[in-house]
Amino acid sequence: MDLKEIQNLIKFVAKSGASEVKLEMDDVKITIKTGSEDDGRTYVQQVPMNMPQQQMQQAPVQNQQQAQAPATEESSSPKASDDDKYVTIKSPIIGTFYRKPSPDKPTFVEVGSEVKEGDVLCTIEAMKLFNEIESEISGKIVKVLVDDSSPVEFDQPLFLVDPS
């Protein structure tokens, strides 16, 4: 399913007044959730059915990020040793990071929040689509690494989670 088809589907769902639509095809599963009338946001989650989510990432961008990562780790080695016991949840896409589902709602998670695998941690807006980012592990949020409404890059660390 290409971007144009997804955009047309979103427009159709928004006009229909439905609050949530789930579509499963051979290779893709899409969930579209529309916000309240005050909110006006549309949330889309697209998951390939035949691949784990981490394999969806673009290899060229990932290689550039990996080339830059060692320099960052060397410059902050004392801090890195403290964070070694934590799992880093990274952004799967480029976009704008939001800690809340809408401006008048509470944040998805706070420092100290217990999360389970699959819990929504934040949303990232990319091309007017709000993608829910779910926890890959169970544990406790130790640190939020990005400010609300900030731009994020592919593979940028978002949260530190203590899996113990």
Image: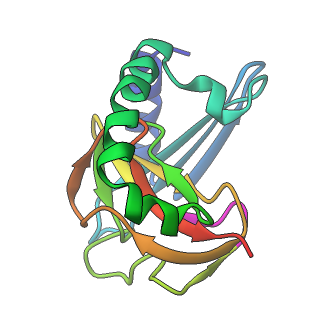
Asked if one can make out residue 99 in the rendered structure from this viewpoint, the answer is: yes
Q: Position of residue 40 (x, y in %)?
A: 29, 60
The quadrant of the image that shows the C terminus is bottom right
* Residue ID at (56%, 64%): 120
Which residue is at the front of the view, 113 or 22? Answer: 113
Q: Quadrant of residue 146?
A: bottom left
Which residue is at the front of the view, 131 or 152? Answer: 152
Looking at the image, is 75 positioned above or below residue 161?
above
Asked if one can make out residue 129 in the rendered structure from this viewpoint, the answer is: no
Q: Position of residue 159 (x, y in %)?
A: 46, 63
The range drawn in magenta is 116-122
* Residue ID at (28%, 34%): 127
* Residue ID at (39%, 55%): 77
Which residue is at the front of the view, 153 or 133? Answer: 153
Looking at the image, is 82 positioned above or below residue 124?
below
Q: In which quarter of the image is residue 22?
A: top right
